[in-house]
Amino acid sequence: MIKQFAFILSLFLLFSCTENREESVEKSVKTDKSNNHKVQQQNTSKEEVESIKKNDSSQEKDTIKDSGLFTIGGFQDKKYYELLIETHLCNPKLNDSVANSSTPCSSRFFKFFPYNHNRRIEDAFMLQVRAGVNNYPYRRLLIFVREKGKLVLMNGIVGYLVERISQNSGVDDLIVAVFDDLGNNNFDRYDVLLKYKDGKYHFVEAIGDLEGEFKSKKLKETASKAIKERIDEKQLIF
């Protein structure tokens, strides 16, 4: 009898914790004042608001599974330098950041990734942009495609690339970390899956946040709905 009671009690506690997690996710995404998913700026966004120091000789880890190191050694091929100039995100006449927030076309501020393996990288690429470039406080992942000979911005994400997942189509699925500025030096981060369809990447589902992975189906569905609404509201993916 005692063993049966203990087993029932353990099940009650397990389901209670799961329901509380679901409620916590939904509430924290819907309001900027929730404390469950906030972190102080110095913990998650220090890189996003710091100025780039001129004599910085270290490499910065910018992504989790996909190597996103900004480097000081320059690009391995001049085509990347030429592509940067074509995006108009940088000033080729500069050697370092200046007071007006102009940024040089340097590997210290930009990182290239492929996403469409059916095309040359000159015609389809992702560009991880370091925080502070063009006076924008957060990292950005910009996705370009060439149409009729000109580069066009296909998608933009306020955040960074986590992982590329190969697909039979030749166009990678993406897992990206999306930053959400909640105000008062508080931030949230949503890890979401994007799939390519009809010429753009689209939100599929949220897979985790600052508290960890959404493991249960119900939690993932609840969180995905709330996070999608938040992302659309603030245009964190565009």
Image (cartoon, helix red, strand yellow):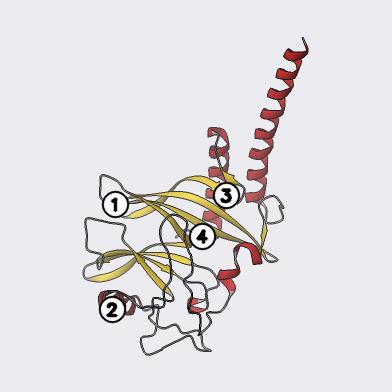
On residue 82, the disc is 2
Alpha carbon separation for disc pair 4 and 1: 22 Å
Q: Position of residue 66 (x, y in %)?
A: 41, 57
Indicate which disc, 3 or 4, sits on the residue closer to the N terminus.
3
Camera-side residue: 225 or 82? 82
* Label whose residue precedes the other's in the sequence (4 or 1): 1
How far apart are labels 3 and 4 at the CA level?
15 Å
Mark 1 falls on what kind of element? loop
Judge by depth and name the residue closer to the eye, 195 or 163.
163
Residue at numbered disc 3: 209
The spot of residue 215 in percent (x, y) is: 54, 37
Q: What residue type is labelled 1?
A: Val
Tag on residue 236?
A: 4
88 sits to left or right of 47: left
CA gap, disc 1 to disc 2? Answer: 24 Å
Q: Residue extending furthest right?
A: 2
* Amino acid tagged 3: Asp
Residue in view at x 70 percent, y 18 percent: 7
Report, in whole angstroms, how far the alpha carbon at label 3 lies from the one at label 2.
36 Å
Q: Where is residue 104 in the image (x, y as percent from the top left)?
A: 41, 83
Identify which amino acid the numbered label 2 is placed on.
Glu
**In the shown orientation, is residue 39 left or right of residue 94?**
right
Whether 126 is drawn above or below 83: the answer is above
Badge 3 marks a residue whose secondary structure is: strand
Using a 10 Å C-alpha cutoff, classify the residue at mark 3 as few (fewer than 14 neighbours), some (14 to 19) or many (20 or more).
some
Answer above or below: position of 219 versus 126: above
**Which amino acid type corresponds to the residue marked 4 in the rendered image?**
Leu
